[in-house]
Amino acid sequence: MIYREAFQRLNLGTAAALSIVVLAALLLLNALQFRGLRRADES
């Protein structure tokens, strides 16, 4: 979707916004994984 917006539709602003949303989602998932791993390590 990001590729299509940026290179096929030449809508770089939307592609950049989508990239930031994906980055935020990945950071959230990463934080949840680290929290789960830390809890598993403590028990």
Image (cartoon, rainbow, N blue to C red):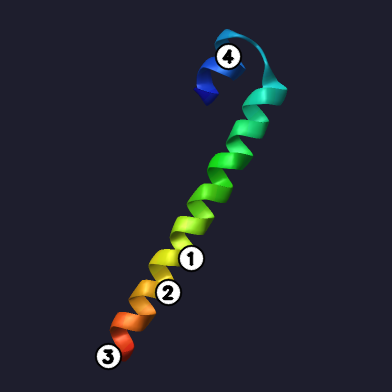
Q: Position of residue 28 (x, y in %)?
A: 51, 57
Q: Earlier in the sequence, mark 4 or mark 3?
A: 4
Q: Using the image, determine if residue 33 lies above or below residue 20.
A: below
**What amino acid type is highlighted by mark number 4?**
Phe
Q: CA distance from mark 3 to mark 1?
A: 19 Å
- Residue denoted by label 2: 35
- Residue denoted by label 3: 43
Q: Residues within 10 Å of mark 3 (few under 14, many from 20)?
A: few
Q: Earlier in the sequence, mark 3 or mark 1?
A: 1
**What amino acid type is highlighted by mark number 1?**
Ala
**What amino acid type is highlighted by mark number 3?**
Ser
Dot 2 and dot 1 residues touching (CB under 8 Å):
yes
- SS under mark 2: helix
- Residue denoted by label 1: 31
- Residue denoted by label 4: 7
Q: CA distance from mark 3 to mark 2?
A: 13 Å
Residue drawn where x is 67% and y is 24% of the image = 14
Q: Residues within 10 Å of mark 1 (few under 14, many from 20)?
A: few
Relative horizontal placement of residue 33, taking residue 6 as reference (left or right): left
Q: Residue furthest top?
A: 9
Q: Earlier in the sequence, mark 1 or mark 4?
A: 4
